[in-house]
């Protein structure tokens, strides 16, 4: 199917300021390009992506009647769409563009060898030109869009995303793994820097979620499987049995009072107990009880207490739902690190060492101590408390990053403690204080005015010991100057790190997302695309992307909603045609392509009495595995087929 | 403080303690009272309790089974506390003995009954105290001046009608073996068995010279070796704890069935389940039918229907 038309290639070499031109001799590369077969024009420009650079391409296309364009500049990741747009505006099919990456692959990595770099740039241009000769015009593929969204995780970030989308008029499924939405914010007492009561400000939003006609709340459920692609995801969700019928439970709590079984309460960080039939907290949404069948003894006292409401159903089974959505927002939050493995802190060994989240539960009026700060060893209000910062965080052997919010939450808990028990001595042992953002530094100053003592200590040299008689704690630490200090307190609160939510890796696998080196979900670009992921149509918000506080989680939730709406608002989406295509005449229907396809994009079907492979273009990622496997050469990735690749490879070795 | 769990195991007692920031839960097994029967392990809803029968090795001596409790599984519900015929298990919360399942009427306490008509007691007699194999009975005699008399003094006391006899019985540990009743020369005691049933030993199956069952039986005289060297059962005193069957090296040599357990009246699925395991479905249904024809059927249906649903999945 050779095109009879004459091939007329234009090559545009970019300086990228001094990024390329500072190393590579762009003049020489341009002159060299002119000598290559098919090239009718070559020029170099200071910034090809800039307005004048783009104009130069358009003009050259007209003037030299170019029908292929090669841009030798940066990685196609950023600017391929830019240049495709440019040549399309000049009347060419956008897929008749080829890029040679002479920046990332050349000038940047060979900055000390300009001569060799120039030669390599010439090689890259030659290869690109060789491939360009074989490019075919393509048409983008159009796929319809399902205008519903799925939000995974109903913490404050997920709530923010769901409410924003619902308000824009889109139907939202909000799936949370836990019995109630709310996430960590519902566990906190007050929030810095304003000291708003946490559940008082989050509770109404949780209720809004439950009431919103556009939101379908699916709690106590796990996302099991995701199929499909942007605009058209099919999601399998498993709803775990609560053994209480959601539609019949009135949330009265009579079953709880009747139940004899007490179970350590996960919601309270195991400080107190809950019943085998219970809700995690009184403001839970949905307010539906759940039976913990691991602990239930099946006495049926709850059934008796429930009486004619008949909400309790021991025969409930897991339920599988299939949701069809156009976009997915992941807002699965974080876990707090429990420093059992760090012997310096004696966590889990000494009665009076707790984490900050345990402290939050002690502060909460509805918590296990009704808001009174008590030591575990004797139930007394401690006369002195030390907060120790950077536990697990900034520790190269554990979590090398800064959790960012621990400075603020420790100051908050210290202030609350001081306000409740002014006679208590409060210390904050820190290494660096991080109180950026609005109102935070002022809050820090307020803490100092309240008489909270801030002592700077070394990040590593710290050790807690227990006085076995009094159960007081002796903290030995080194100051910046190398002086050893010793401090005896009645209680220690550890500012432990925010770590990736348990199950993040599994969910990443299900969604096809990547996680960064610290285990949080990875964004498409840390600065410019913090909400997007590398999978089109899937966005991340809140602490699942990295540690942050409530205001940023809310902002990211809203941002993710906008990003999702960008997709949901369209009737159809265009996707890249650079995918596998089957030559039906050659295909024997052997099914090897179907076997190797990792994305389930190929199916061998019977058509007119013979077997033939069919590609779901929306699922195909254009990886080419099928093409390698095909014994007859019937399946090829468009513009990345043997003819293009072979031409490029031959050009690489033949100068 | 994060949750912490301890386990201390000595030949005298096994203690499991779970400490939360605001609560302490404790389970105490008094090994000196525990006879090693399997009742608790049969009905523990979390399957936290296991019984290990010591290996039979050449050397003689009773092979009393040893109870172990998995500290990770125990949830301090108190079902074992309720069922132990010998009162060997106690559950405590924050230092106070408490049986959560009994408080909520999710599980019955056993009904133990030993009635003594002290007016019939001759001062100075302590046959019952001596007879009790578990040491639960304490007989005392008080003179008209309120002074406690020794038994010899009481016997020799000139005006016995002035003396007052007290018989204190620690009922919590009494399985109702009736030895006190049988030994009382005056017929002053009436003791009721807690567990009723039947026991039969198929002596044809007994290995030559084996008397493991006799060695572990907590009630002396219930199992004895007869003149022909075969084990003989005296059912009158058997408490149907089943420890004999547990140590018996031959399967089916001892046939033991429990038919009825005296307990506080109760309506509870957990008890029905326990009863089914301790006795049999037949006896469970009998109890349920007795309670209420209609209600009984409903519960059985619920239980069985649900078992069918579960096994089907
Ligand atoms: C001790 C402490 C004190 C703090 N105090 C403050 C403060 O005063 N002010 C402030 O601004 N910030 C504070 N923070 C930070 C605050 O908790 C977080 O910024 C905020 O809660 C993050 O919300 P999120 O929605 O991202 O995550 P989370 O609150 O963690 O919510 C995640 C939700 O996703 C669900 N989920 C997780 N995995 C899955 C899954 N696989 N499938 C379905 N659902 C899933 C969870 O059940 C949960 O409901 C504090 C943090 C700590 C540790
Ligand atoms: S049946 Fe289970 S959940 Fe219901 S009251 Fe009894 S122990 Fe509690």
Image (spheres, coloured by chain):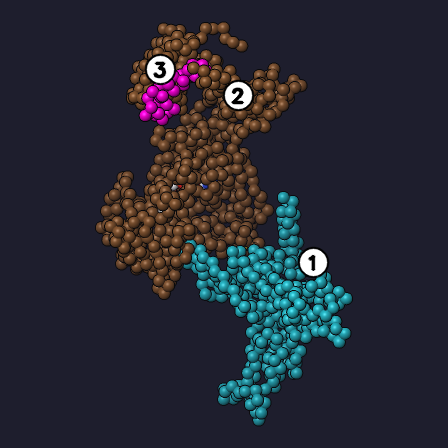
Chain colours: A brown, B cyan
Q: What is the quadrant of residue B226 in the picture?
A: bottom right
Q: What residue is drawn where x is 59% and y is 79%?
A: B129
Q: Assess whether residue A123 is covered by the magenta stretch.
A: yes
Against A339, residue A556 (above or below) is above
Using residue A606 as the reference point, say whether residue B144 is left or right of it: left
Q: How crowded is mark 2: few (under 14 residues within 10 Å), some or many (20 or more)?
A: many
Residues tagged by mark 2 and mark 1 found on one chain of the structure: no
| SS label for mark 2 | strand
Contact between marks 2 and 1 (CB within 8 A): the answer is no
Q: In which quarter of the image is ligand 1?
A: top left
> For numbered disc 1, what is the local secondary structure?
helix
Give the letter of the chain under mark 3: A
Q: Is B115 above or below relative to A272?
A: below
Residue topped by disc 3: A29
Res B248 label:
none
Q: Can residue A196 be seen in this view?
A: no
The boundaries of the magenta stretch are A103-132
Numbered mark located on residue B282 in the image: 1
Mark linked to residue A580: 2
Q: How far apart are marks 3 and 1 (CA)?
A: 95 Å
Q: Earlier in the sequence, mark 2 or mark 3?
A: 3
Q: Nearer the viewer, mark 2 or mark 3?
A: 3
Residue under the point 74% across and 73% down: B229
Mark 3 residue element: helix
Where is residue A88 shown, x and y percent of the image? 41, 13
Residue drawn at (32%, 21%) of the image? A114
């Amino acid at each position: 199917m050779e095109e009879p038309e004459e091939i007329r290639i234009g090559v545009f070499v970019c300086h990228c300021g001094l990024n390329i031109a500072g190393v590579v001799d762009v003049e020489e590369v341009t002159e060299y390009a002119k000598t290559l077969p098919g090239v009718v024009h070559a020029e170099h420009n200071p910034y090809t992506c800039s307005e004048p650079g783009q104009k130069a391409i358009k003009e050259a296309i007209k003037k030299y009647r170019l029908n292929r364009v090669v841009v030798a500049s940066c990685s196609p990741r950023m600017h391929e769409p830019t240049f495709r747009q440019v040549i399309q505006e000049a009347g060419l099919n956008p897929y008749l563009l080829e890029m040679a990456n002479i920046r990332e692959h050349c000038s940047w990595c060979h900055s000390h060898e300009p001569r060799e770099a120039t030669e390599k740039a010439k090689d890259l241009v030659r290869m690109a030109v060789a491939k360009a000769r074989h490019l075919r015009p393509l048409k983008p593929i159009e796929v319809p869009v399902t205008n519903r969204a799925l939000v995974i995780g109903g913490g404050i970030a997920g709530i923010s995303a769901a409410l924003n989308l619902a308000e824009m008029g889109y139907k939202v499924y909000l799936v949370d793994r836990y019995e109630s939405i709310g996430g960590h914010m519902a566990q906190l007492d007050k929030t810095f820097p304003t000291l708003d009561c946490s559940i008082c400000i989050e509770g109404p939003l949780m209720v809004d979620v439950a009431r919103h006609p556009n939101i379908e709340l699916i709690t106590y459920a796990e996302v099991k499987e995701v199929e499909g692609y942007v605009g058209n995801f099919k999601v399998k969700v498993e709803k775990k049995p609560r053994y209480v019928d959601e539609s019949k439970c009135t949330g009265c709590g009579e079953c709880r009072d009747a139940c004899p079984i007490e179970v350590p309460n996960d919601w309270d960080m195991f400080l107190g107990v809950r019943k085998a039939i219970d809700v995690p907290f009184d403001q839970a949404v949905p307010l539906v009880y759940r039976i913990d069948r691991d602990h239930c003894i099946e006495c049926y006292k709850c059934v008796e207490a429930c009486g004619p409401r008949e909400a309790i159903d021991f025969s409930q089974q897991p339920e599988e739902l299939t949701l069809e959505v156009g976009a997915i927002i992941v807002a699965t939050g974080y876990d707090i690190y429990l420093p059992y493995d760090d012997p310096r802190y004696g966590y889990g060994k000494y009665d009076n060492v707790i984490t900050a989240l345990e402290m939050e539960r002690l502060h909460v009026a509805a918590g296990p101590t009704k808001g009174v700060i008590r030591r575990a060893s004797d139930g007394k209000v401690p006369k002195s408390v030390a907060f120790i910062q950077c536990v697990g965080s900034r520790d190269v052997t554990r979590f090398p990053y800064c959790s960012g919010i621990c400075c603020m939450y420790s100051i908050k808990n210290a202030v609350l403690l001081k306000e409740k028990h002014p006679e208590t001595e409060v210390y904050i042992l820190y290494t660096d204080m991080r109180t950026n953002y609005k109102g935070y530094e002022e809050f820090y100053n307020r803490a100092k005015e309240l008489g909270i003592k801030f002592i700077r200590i070394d990040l590593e040299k710290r050790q807690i010991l227990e006085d076995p008689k009094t159960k007081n704690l002796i903290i030995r630490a080194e100051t910046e100057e190398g002086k050893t200090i010793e401090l005896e307190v009645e209680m220690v609160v550890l500012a432990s790190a925010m770590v990736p939510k348990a199950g993040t890796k599994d969910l990443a696998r299900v969604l096809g997302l990547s996680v960064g080196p610290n285990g949080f979900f990875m964004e498409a670009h840390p600065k410019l695309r913090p909400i997007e992921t590398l999978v089109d149509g899937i966005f991340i918000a809140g602490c699942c992307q990295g540690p942050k506080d409530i205001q940023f989680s809310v902002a990211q939730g809203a941002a993710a909603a906008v990003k999702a709406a960008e997709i949901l608002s369209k009737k159809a989406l265009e996707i890249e045609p650079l995918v596998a295509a089957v030559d039906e005449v050659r295909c024997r229907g052997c099914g090897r392509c179907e076997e190797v396809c990792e994305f389930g994009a190929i199916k061998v079907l019977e058509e007119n009495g013979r077997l033939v492979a069919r590609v779901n273009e929306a699922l195909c990622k254009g990886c080419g595995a099928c093409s390698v496997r095909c014994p007859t050469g019937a399946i090829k990735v468009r513009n990345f087929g043997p003819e293009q690749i072979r031409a490029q490879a031959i050009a690489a070795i033949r100068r | 403080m994060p949750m912490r769990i301890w386990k201390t195991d000595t030949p005298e007692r096994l203690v499991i303690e779970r400490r939360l920031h605001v609560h302490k839960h404790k389970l105490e097994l008094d090994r000196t009272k525990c006879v090693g029967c399997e009742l608790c392990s049969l009905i523990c809803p979390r399957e936290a309790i296991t019984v290990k029968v010591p290996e039979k090795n050449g050397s003689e001596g009773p092979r009393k089974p040893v109870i172990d409790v998995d500290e990770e599984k125990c949830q301090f519900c108190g079902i074992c506390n309720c069922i132990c015929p010998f009162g060997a298990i106690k559950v405590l919360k924050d230092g106070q003995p408490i049986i959560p399942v009994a408080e909520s009427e999710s599980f019955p306490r056993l009904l133990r009954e030993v009635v003594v008509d002290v007016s019939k007691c001759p001062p100075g007699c302590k046959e019952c105290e001596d007879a009790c194999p578990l040491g639960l009975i304490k007989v005392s005699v008080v003179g008209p001046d309120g002074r406690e008399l020794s038994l010899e003094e009481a016997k020799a006391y000139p005006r016995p009608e002035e003396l007052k006899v007290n018989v204190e019985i620690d009922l919590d540990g009494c399985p109702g073996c009736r030895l006190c009743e049988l030994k009382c020369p005056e017929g002053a005691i009436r003791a009721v068995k807690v567990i009723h049933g039947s026991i039969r030993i198929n002596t044809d199956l007994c290995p030559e010279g084996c008397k493991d069952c006799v060695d572990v039986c907590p009630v002396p005289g219930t199992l004895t070796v007869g003149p022909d060297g075969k084990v003989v059962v005296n059912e009158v005193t058997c408490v149907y704890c089943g420890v004999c069957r547990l140590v018996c090296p031959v399967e089916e040599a001892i046939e033991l069935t429990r038919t009825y357990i005296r307990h506080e009246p109760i309506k509870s699925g957990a008890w029905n389940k326990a009863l089914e395991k301790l006795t049999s479905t037949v006896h469970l249904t009998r109890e349920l039918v007795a309670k209420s024809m209609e209600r009984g059927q409903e519960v059985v249906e619920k239980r069985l229907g649900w078992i069918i649903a579960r096994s089907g999945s």
